[in-house]
Every structure is written in C-alpha cells, then in structure tokens.
Image (cartoon, helix red, strand yellow):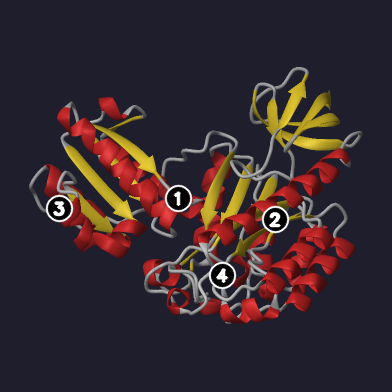
Amino acid sequence: MKVGFVSLGCSKNLVDTEMMIGLFKKHNYEIVNEPQKADIIVINTCGFIESAKEEAINTILEMAEYKKENCKFLIVTGCLVERYKEELIKAIPEVDLFIKFSEYENIWEQIENLINHNKVGNEKLDFLNRVISTGKNYAYIRIAEGCNNFCTFCAIPYIRGRFTSRKIEDILEEAKMLANKGYKELIIIAQDTSKYGVDIYGKPMLAELLHKISKIDGIEWIRFLYTYPETITEELISEVKNNDKICKYFDIPMQHISDKILKKMNRKSTGESIRNLITKLRNEIPGVVIRSTLMVGFPGETEEDFEELYEFVKWAKLDKLGCFTYSKEEGTAAARMDNQVHPMTKKKRYNKIMTLQKEISEENMKKNIGRTLKVLVEDIGIGRTYMDVPDIDGVVYIKGNTKPNTFINCKITDYKEYDLVGEVIER
C-alpha cells in the first residue's frame, strides 16, 4: 500500500513524522508525495495556538476529500489530537484513526489493527530508523521532549508533558548515523535546549553535548535552537565562541522586556538580565547572530509596556526577529486573566514592531556587503550562511558554479530584503 504524509507545526513535530515514515517504510509500505496516489494518508498535527488549530482542521478536511477517490484510511496524530481527541472523533467521522502524542508507545499496534485487523507486537517510533524529509544537507536532532517552564500563555507542557532529556550516548549514536549518511549540518532542537540534561544528569549539559557532536567526522555545522535567556551558561557561551563547528547563532525566545509582563508570563528572566545577555554575547562572540521572538497583546499589556518593548527593539537591533500576537489558549493561566487586549490593538502593535524590525533588518543586511562568508550550497545557485536557519531565515543567491551539499566561500555583493546575493570565491 502507498502512504502519504502531511507534517504540520514545528521542527520537533517533523522529527516525529520522519520516525513515522521510517516505521511504515520498515514494514514495506511505499511512501508517496502526492496525496491523490496514497492508499493511506497520515496527518501529524500541531495544536499550539488558534491559527495552528485552524490549519490542522482545514488540512484534515482537505485530505478527507481523497477518501472519495483512492484513499482508504485517514490517520491523524499529534498535538491537536492530544488536546481534543474525543471532540475530533465526534466532529470529523471521516478520520479512521486518531492517535494522541501520549499513545505513540503502541502506535504501530493501532495502525496495524486498523489496516489489517490484526494485533501485532508493540513497536515504537525509532530515532535511528526515521526517514529524513529535509533534503540531503541538514537534519534535525531532538534532544529532549516536553517542557517544565509552564509559561502562562503556553499549552505545550499539558500537551507534550514534562521536560525529559535523551541520554547523550543515544543522541551521539543518532548523530553518527546522520553523518554516515552524508548530512553536513545538524540542528539541535528541544522545547528548551539550554535545560538539556538537568533532569538526568543534575546540571545543564548542552555545552558538553555540542562538544561531543563536534568530534564526529563529516559534521561541519552544528546549530542549536530555542535557548531560554536565563539558562544560557558561561560554558555554553565559551563552547560556541571557541568551537569552529558550532554556528555563532543564538535563538532566544525572549517574549517581552517589561518586568511586569515577564512576571505575568511566568518567565524567569527580567528586562535587565535580557539586555545584559545580549551585550555579553556580542562582546564575547565576534559576529554572533541573535534571533528572538516577541509577543504583543498579552493580558494587561499597557501602552507603556508596549513602548518599552518598542524601544528595546530599537536598542537591540536583533539580527532576526519574529513577532506574534497573544492567542488565548484554553487551559492556560493567561486565558483566565483580566484585561485581555482588544484584537485590533494587538494587530496594531504587531504591525508597529514588524515595521521597525524591517528597517533594522535592512541596516543589518547592508553590513554584509563586501564580506566573504562560508556558504552551504543547498541547491544550484542557492545556499545558506551560518546566519540562516532553514525555512526560517533567508538564503544566499550565488553567482558561479555550485554543487549541492558542499561548502564554498562566497563574497556578498548585494541583498534583497531578507536574502543575500554573492559570487563564488572558492570551494
């Protein structure tokens, strides 16, 4: 039988999808990219915020239309199912099987029982048996699951559970497997990578993990995402500074700068500690790139709070910045808070932040003209620098002969909004 997959949401969810693909492939199912050709369609959903839930529902309904043609079984998994399985069963009867994230321990038993009506031995998702869906240049490694931060606006701890680190030896085995398959760049992910190891080793171990991965032959770039500002250690800063394989790139979800709002969010950092961290990173790591996400319209955010955030964006001149409006998520503490901000006010504040950041981004891009940068070629004429995370940041349009999955030195000659233009200097 032929199986097609749709993966929604974050890169952490994508790793689950890749393991599902590997499981079907192991049992001799044919993987197809076109849903109209699939006998089985699997949708791995996100349920983090309202827009993600809407996208998931629309995708399920869209894929359900293929049951009128070739599709025999529609399977839906992931975070949306974790939150709303019973409601979904009643609302979308076209789906043949809903599997919650917490039910992945016996995922294959459920699938085989649906398709072949026979009970089979319990078989779990396997990191070493997943099929990488991101091309030949890079792959994600998820080093932990869940979250202990319990930010008042976020439902992830209730969906994915408490923070649970994987053992270093298991992660290294996966990294070696990926290196042997030719992947040049590994992207380390978790809900909060800076807390890696605290639960099983009693202390943060991200710096040591990165150091050990960097010793693996074939890996040339390592980047890590989602480090919370209050748990970035001196050891981590030193490792990034001194290890040439680690991209000088920090993705730090700051959310806000007002102490009042940070406290209401149950964040552990303060405005002062965030400013100090930015200054420290820039002083200690030449060429460091700092990316962050901010939230506007959190309950109780006044004009004064927003202006403080706006002035912070002006001061910080972050290399990369995403912004989103607060989404009222049921089951979270913030959803029950007074002084909910009007949607029009949230949108206005969002637009103001992003207009400012567009100007800052243009200033930052201009500074790259004339620089010679190491570029990983992803496709003919297209690559990325250490400053660019796949599917999030920009690319480099390259003039000259290029070969995918190789590194070149590229002189930057121009820029186009969020992308750079350059020419090959040497391989």
Do the numbered discs 4 and 3 sit on residues whose CB atoms are within 8 Å?
A: no
Q: Quadrant of the C terminus?
A: top right
Viewer-proximal residue among 385 and 426:
385
Q: Nearer the viewer, mark 1 or mark 2?
A: 2
SS at mark 2? Answer: helix
Q: Amino acid at mark 1?
A: Gly
Q: Is residue 263 left or right of residue 364?
A: left
Q: Is any part of residue 245 visible from this angle? A: no
Q: Quadrant of the N terminus?
A: top left
Do the numbered discs 3 and 2 sit on residues whose CB atoms are within 8 Å?
A: no
Q: Which residue is mark 2?
A: 353
Q: CA distance from mark 1 to mark 4?
A: 22 Å
Residue at the (55%, 65%) spot, across then down:
168
Q: Nearer the viewer, mark 3 or mark 2?
A: 2
Name of the residue lying farthest toward the right: 370
Q: Which residue is mark 4?
A: 298
Crowding at dot 2, Cα within 10 Å, few <14 / some 14-19 / many 20+, comes out as many
Q: Is residue 341 left or right of residue 129?
A: right
Q: CA distance from mark 1 to mark 2?
A: 24 Å
Q: CA distance from mark 4 to mark 2?
A: 15 Å
Crowding at dot 1, Cα within 10 Å, few <14 / some 14-19 / many 20+, comes out as some
Residue 248, x across and y down, in percent: 77, 53
Q: Looking at the image, is mark 3 or mark 2 earlier in the sequence?
A: 3
Q: Nearer the viewer, mark 1 or mark 4?
A: 4
SS at mark 4? Answer: loop
Crowding at dot 4, Cα within 10 Å, few <14 / some 14-19 / many 20+, comes out as many
Q: Which residue is mark 3?
A: 120
Q: Which residue is mark 1?
A: 9
Q: Looking at the image, is mark 1 or mark 4 earlier in the sequence?
A: 1
